[in-house]
Image: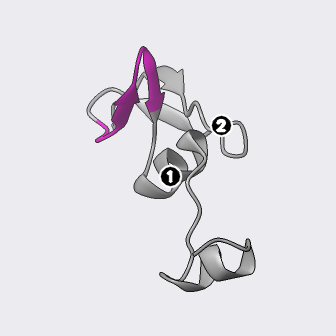
């Protein structure tokens, strides 16, 4: 008989919402938990760009 894990929270990334169980590795942002590095990046609003190209497209130096 397998023990069921208890759901303690849900990923704070609104695009994900995955169940978080006791013992899962997570990242914490303030009082919120996110289930993965990808969700952490999305939650904080980071984007991937190519160095040097982003600024030149935006008209910067």
Q: Do the residues labelled 2 and 1 touch (CB within 8 Å)?
A: no
- Asked whether the viewer can see residue 4, the reply is no
Q: Name the residue under label 2.
A: 17
Where residue 34 appears, x then y in whole percent? 47, 37
Quarter of the figure with the N terminus = top left
Position of residue 26 in the picture relative to residue 46 (left or right): left
**Is residue 13 inside the magenta stretch?**
no
The residue sitting at 50% across, 21% down in the picture is: 9
What's the magenta region?
24-33
**SS for callout 1:** helix
Residue 28 drawn above or below residue 34: above
Q: Estimate the spatial distance between the alpha carbons at disc 2 and disc 1, rounded to whole Å.
A: 15 Å
**Residue 12: percent from left, percent from top:** 58, 30
Residue drawn 44% across the image and 28% down it = 33
Which residue matches tag 1? 41
Q: Which of 53 and 10 is in front in this view?
A: 53
Mark 1 burial class by Cα count in 10 Å: few <14, some 14-19, many 20+:
some
The location of residue 3, given as percent across then percent down, is 33, 31
């Amino acid at each position: 008989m397998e023990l069921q894990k208890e759901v303690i929270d849900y990923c704070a990334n609104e695009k994900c919402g995955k169940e978080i169980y006791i013992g899962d590795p997570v990242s914490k942002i303030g009082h919120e938990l996110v289930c993965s590095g990808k969700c952490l990046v999305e939650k904080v609003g980071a984007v991937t760009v190519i160095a040097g190209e982003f600024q030149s497209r935006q008209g910067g130096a």
